[in-house]
Image (tube, rainbow, N blue to C red):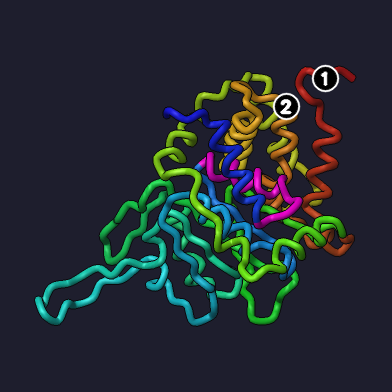
C-alpha cells in the first residue's frame, strides 16, 4: 500500500466530518468496524444522524453501495436474490439481491420480519449468500451498516440474540450540544445538502490493505488475559442472563487492534480494550428479568465490571 494508512484514516474522518458535526467518537467507531471487517448497528432516537453517518461513510469509500429501507413487506429474496426462469432461453437465471454490493445500508432493520432479518445471518458471518443451494461470495470489502430506533415498539420486530451477536459493534450518536446544533443549522441552511458534495477519498483496495494491517498489531499475553477475564466476568454476573460469547471476545481483541491502528501504534494498550468494551460487548449482553425490573442496563453493568477488574500494568 503506497499511501500511509494514518493519512487515509484521517482523510476518511475529515470527509465524514463535513456532514456529521461533533461526533468524532461515533465516526471513529464506524471506521474501526470497517478496519475489522465488521458490521455496525447504529441505534438511537430519530433525527440524530444515524442514516447520515452510514451514508457519509459509504460515500467516502469508492465502493458499490445499496440502501434498503426495511419494511414488513421486504422479503428475504429482496436481500439475498432469487432464481427465475428466463422466458427467452428457458434456463434458470439468478437475479442478485441487495447484498450484491460492498456497502449495504439496512435502514430501520427492526421494521422487517424476523424471516427477512435472518436472511442476513449468513451474509454477515461468512460474507456469502446461498440461494437454491448455490453459494456466492460477496464483493470485498463487505460491510453492513444497520440503523434502528430503540424507542419504537409499534410495527417493529426486535433483533434476536444471534442477529445482535453478528454486529461487530453498536454505536449511539446522541443529541448535539447547542454549539454543535448551530453548526449543523449553518451547514444545512444553504441550497444544497453537504451530503451531495461528498466525494470518495479511499478506494476498495486501500480499505482491504488497511484491513490487513489490523492483524499485525501486537497483543501481549497480559492483554489477552484481560479480554478473557472481562468476558468471563459477564458470564458469571448474576444480573446477566447471557454473557459475552467467544465471538464477542474475538471482536473486542480485534477492535482494540484497530483502535491502536487509529492511534498510530503497533501494539495494544489496556486502555484500547477499555475504550472498545462498551460498543463491542454491551449489545451482546442479555439482562435477567429481575435486573430489568430494577432499571439496570447492560452498559451500566459492564462499566461496573471494568471498574472492578484489575487492569494489566496498573498497581492498586
Q: Main secondary structure of the magenta part?
A: helix
Image location (x, y in percent) of residue 187: 71, 61
* Numbered circle sitting on residue 314: 1
Query: Callout 1: few (<14), some (14-19), or many (20+) C-alpha neighbours within 10 Å?
Result: few
Q: Answer left or right for 72 relative to 130.
A: right
Residue with the mark numbered 2: 270
Position of 150 compared to 86: left or right?
Answer: right
- Asked whether residue 23 is drawn in magenta, I would say yes
User: Toward which corner of the image does residue 158 lie, by quadrant?
Assistant: bottom right
Numbered tag placed on residue 287 in the rendering: none
For the question of whether residue 242 can be seen, the reply is no
Tell me if label 2 and label 1 are in contact, CB under 8 Å. yes
The residue lying toward the viewer, choosing from 176 and 309, is: 176
Q: Which residues are magenta?
A: 19-36
Q: Secondary structure at mark 1?
A: loop
Tell me how many marks there are. Answer: 2
In the rendered image, the quadrant that contains the N terminus is: top left
Q: Nearer the viewer, residue 225 or 212?
A: 212
Q: Left or right? Give the position of 100 relative to 103.
A: left
Residue 264 x %, y % = 62, 26
Residue at figure coordinates x 70%, y 24% from the top left: 269
Query: Is 20 colored magenta in this rendering?
Result: yes
Of helix, strand and loop, which one carries label 2?
helix
Mark earlier in primary sequence (2, 1): 2
Looking at the rendering, which quadrant does residue 218 occupy? top right
- The residue lying at 27 percent from left, 66 percent from top is 132
Q: Is residue 164 above or below residue 75?
A: above
Left or right? Give the position of 170 relative to 184: left
Amino acid at each position: 500500500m503506497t499511501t500511509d494508512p494514518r493519512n487515509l484514516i484521517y482523510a476518511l474522518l475529515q470527509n465524514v466530518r463535513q456532514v456529521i458535526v461533533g461526533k468524532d467518537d461515533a465516526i471513529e467507531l464506524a471506521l474501526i468496524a470497517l478496519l475489522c471487517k465488521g458490521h455496525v448497528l447504529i441505534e438511537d432516537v430519530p433525527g440524530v444522524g444515524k442514516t447520515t453517518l452510514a451514508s457519509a461513510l459509504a460515500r467516502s469509500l469508492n465502493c458499490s453501495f445499496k440502501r434498503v429501507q426495511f419494511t414488513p413487506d421486504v422479503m428475504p429474496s429482496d436481500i439475498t436474490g432469487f432464481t427465475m426462469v428466463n422466458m427467452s432461453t428457458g434456463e434458470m437465471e439468478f437475479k442478485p439481491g441487495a447484498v450484491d454490493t460492498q456497502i449495504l445500508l439496512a435502514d430501520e432493520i427492526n421494521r422487517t420480519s424476523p424471516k427477512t432479518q435472518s436472511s442476513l445471518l449468513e451474509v454477515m458471518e461468512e460474507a456469502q449468500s446461498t440461494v437454491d443451494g448455490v453459494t456466492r461470495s460477496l464483493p470485498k470489502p463487505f460491510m453492513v451498516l444497520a440503523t434502528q430506533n430503540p424507542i419504537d415498539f409499534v410495527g417493529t420486530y426486535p433483533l434476536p440474540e444471534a442477529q445482535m451477536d453478528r454486529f461487530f459493534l453498536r454505536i449511539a450518536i446522541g443529541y448535539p450540544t447547542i454549539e454543535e446544533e448551530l453548526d449543523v443549522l449553518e451547514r444545512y441552511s444553504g441550497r444544497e445538502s453537504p451530503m451531495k458534495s461528498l466525494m470518495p477519498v479511499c478506494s476498495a483496495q486501500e480499505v482491504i490493505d488497511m484491513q490487513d494491517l489490523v492483524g499485525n498489531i501486537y497483543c501481549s499475553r497480559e492483554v489477552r488475559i484481560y479480554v478473557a477475564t472481562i468476558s468471563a466476568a459477564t458470564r458469571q454476573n448474576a444480573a446477566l442472563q447471557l454473557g459475552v460469547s467467544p465471538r464477542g471476545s474475538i471482536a473486542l481483541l480485534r477492535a482494540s487492534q484497530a483502535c491502536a491502528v487509529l492511534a498510530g501504534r503497533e501494539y495494544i494498550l489496556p486502555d484500547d480494550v477499555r475504550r472498545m468494551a462498551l460498543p463491542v460487548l454491551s449489545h451482546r449482553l442479555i439482562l435477567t428479568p429481575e435486573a430489568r425490573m430494577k432499571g439496570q442496563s447492560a452498559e451500566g453493568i459492564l462499566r461496573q465490571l471494568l471498574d472492578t477488574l484489575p487492569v494489566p500494568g496498573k498497581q492498586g
